[in-house]
Amino acid sequence: VLLLDLDSQANLTSVVSPLPVEEHLEDMFDALYNKDHLPIEHITDTLDLVPSGLSLAHYESATVSDNMRVYTLQDMLATVAKDYDFALIDCPPALGTISNVALVAADYLVLVTTPTELAYQGMLMVGNLMKKVQENSRLNRNIKLLGVIVTKYRTSRVANAYVKKIEKAGDQVNPELAQVAKQEYTAFYSQAYEGFLKAMETETPPFNGIPSTSLEYMIVNMAVELGHLDVASKLVSKL
């Protein structure tokens, strides 16, 4: 696996590399600006990294006269693609040249968001940018939305409402993938639901550290999601 850090904050580099960010002799800025080679750092036998640094924040202004800069990462990845099963690109939380460079080079886009209004609007903006890249035959017609990861999720009416909005947006971008994801999600949910019910019948609380009341609330939510309203009603009457 090859990790490419395209964020000037260099959080990925800080987490993965044993070297401090400022001690890398070459980083992503050098690669994109000089168009020479990717400065690949070997982390483990199965994991490599192209590090980033604060210098990447100046990339857009430093290459303003380069009309071909949007293809730079795509071309450089092509030279090492045979050496890896996957290449994961960590993008900055902003829409700009760097994001365009990543979308032109990528086969798939994975969106990471939170169940809030501002994050939802930001997700739509990135989706619109991907659509523009798709529609331009000179950029990347083949890029597809692989999925959306919702982080910092806590069960609530507001959070659930945003998850449904996110699912709807994903359906519109990639309905076939969304249907597969929903089927896998339902299968997983059903298994968890059956497991929790069995735990309540056979074990004494707390269940693996989960208080009885908390577990019952979890099962109520699962039962409603899966359409088992009779079970949900019975549990609610006990709470």
Image (cartoon, helix red, strand yellow):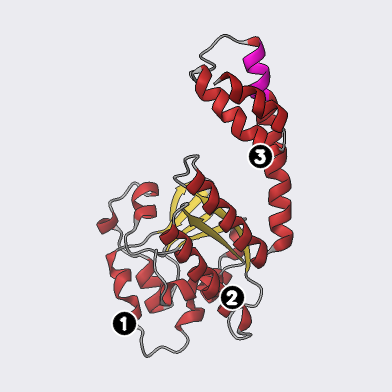
Q: Which region is colored magenta?
A: 195-201
Judge depth for marks 1 and 2 and give the one in front. 2
Count neighbours of disc 2 (C-alpha within 10 A) and say few if under 14, some if 14 to 19, many if 20 or more: some
Secondary element under disc 3, as helix, strand or loop, is helix
Q: Which residue is mark 1?
A: 62
Residue 219 is left or right of residue 229, and the answer is left
Q: Nearer the viewer, residue 46 or 133?
A: 133
Secondary element under disc 1, as helix, strand or loop, is helix
Return the mark for residue 131: 2
Q: Residue at x 73, y 54 (%)?
A: 179
Q: Name the kind of residue labelled 1 in the image.
A: Ala
Q: Name the kind of residue labelled 2 in the image.
A: Lys
Q: Name the kind of residue labelled 3 in the image.
A: Glu
Return the mark for residue 225: 3
Count neighbours of disc 3 (C-alpha within 10 A) and say few if under 14, some if 14 to 19, many if 20 or more: some
Question: In the rendered image, which quarter is residue 199 located in?
Answer: top right
Q: Nearer the viewer, residue 87 or 225?
A: 225
